[in-house]
Amino acid sequence: MKKVLLLLPRGFELVEAAAFIDVFGWNALYGVGKIEICTCGIQKEVPGSFGQKLMANTTLDQIVVDEFEALVLPGGFEEFGFYEEAMGSRVIDLIKTFHEQNRWIATVCTGALPAAESGILKGQPATTHNTKKRQQFLAERGAVLSRERVVKANRLITSSGPGTALSVALLLLEQLTDNRNAEKIKKLMLVE
């Protein structure tokens, strides 16, 4: 069975993480190629944005990258401590390892910022939240800025905001299974 690692730094945005849990959950029930989502935090109980907490399946120190086909990194809010963990050396090293092993990396919104910090977006088309500050962060680290809502390039997926989370999850599902399956799940979930 394929596995996807959904990394949850403190302050992650709930809707961005939930999109992957739902899309891959629907695939487990109605799709092909069962793919398990494994949530992971620095600690087991992860405080997300807006005072919500999620109990992760595992912690970062227990991760064996070889067991996973892809890494997902939702964005989050500075006000809730997202950048403290997401820009930490443990997360940056994990991103680099997934990239070095040629595995898929999907980010949503500001989840692209740790990817840029790791150096993997250098020379790659990418996007993030459309604020000037966030876009400049990507550009300063060598990303080729795109105005597209979702950008796929060389096993890297970036997107422009929380509203793109379902699109990114479905695009990753397509890469790990096929277009027909992703379209089936999209239709069943009534995603437009």
Image: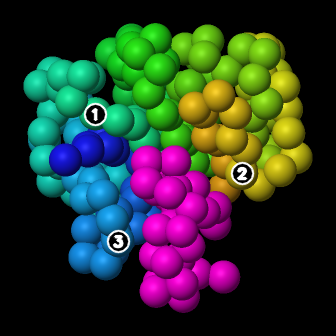
The residue closer to the viewer here, 75 or 29, is 29
Q: Secondary structure at mark 3?
A: loop
Q: Earlier in the sequence, mark 3 or mark 2?
A: 3
Q: Residues within 10 Å of mark 1 (few under 14, many from 20)?
A: many
Q: CA distance from mark 3 to mark 2?
A: 23 Å
Confirm or deny contact between disc 1 and disc 3 (CB under 8 A): no
Residue visible at 77% across and 55% down in the picture: 149
- Residue 187 locus on image (x, y percent): 54, 84
Task: Return the mark for residue 150.
Answer: 2
Residue visible at 67% across and 21% down in the picture: 121
| Residue stretch rendered in magenta on the structure | 163-192
Does the magenta portion include 74? no
Q: CA distance from mark 2 to mark 1?
A: 23 Å
Q: Is residue 85 above or below residue 141?
A: below
Given the image, on which type of amino acid does mark 1 rest?
Answer: Phe
Magenta residues: mostly which secondary structure? helix
Residue at the disc numbered 1:
68
Given the image, on which type of amino acid does mark 2 rest?
Answer: Val
Would you say residue 76 is visible in this rendering?
A: no
Residue visible at 35% across and 35% down in the picture: 69
Residue at the disc numbered 3:
31
Circle 1 or circle 3, nearest the eye: 3
Q: CA distance from mark 1 to mark 3?
A: 19 Å
Q: Residues within 10 Å of mark 3 (few under 14, many from 20)?
A: many
Given the image, on which type of amino acid does mark 3 rest?
Answer: Gly
Q: Earlier in the sequence, mark 2 or mark 1?
A: 1
Q: Residues within 10 Å of mark 2 (few under 14, many from 20)?
A: many
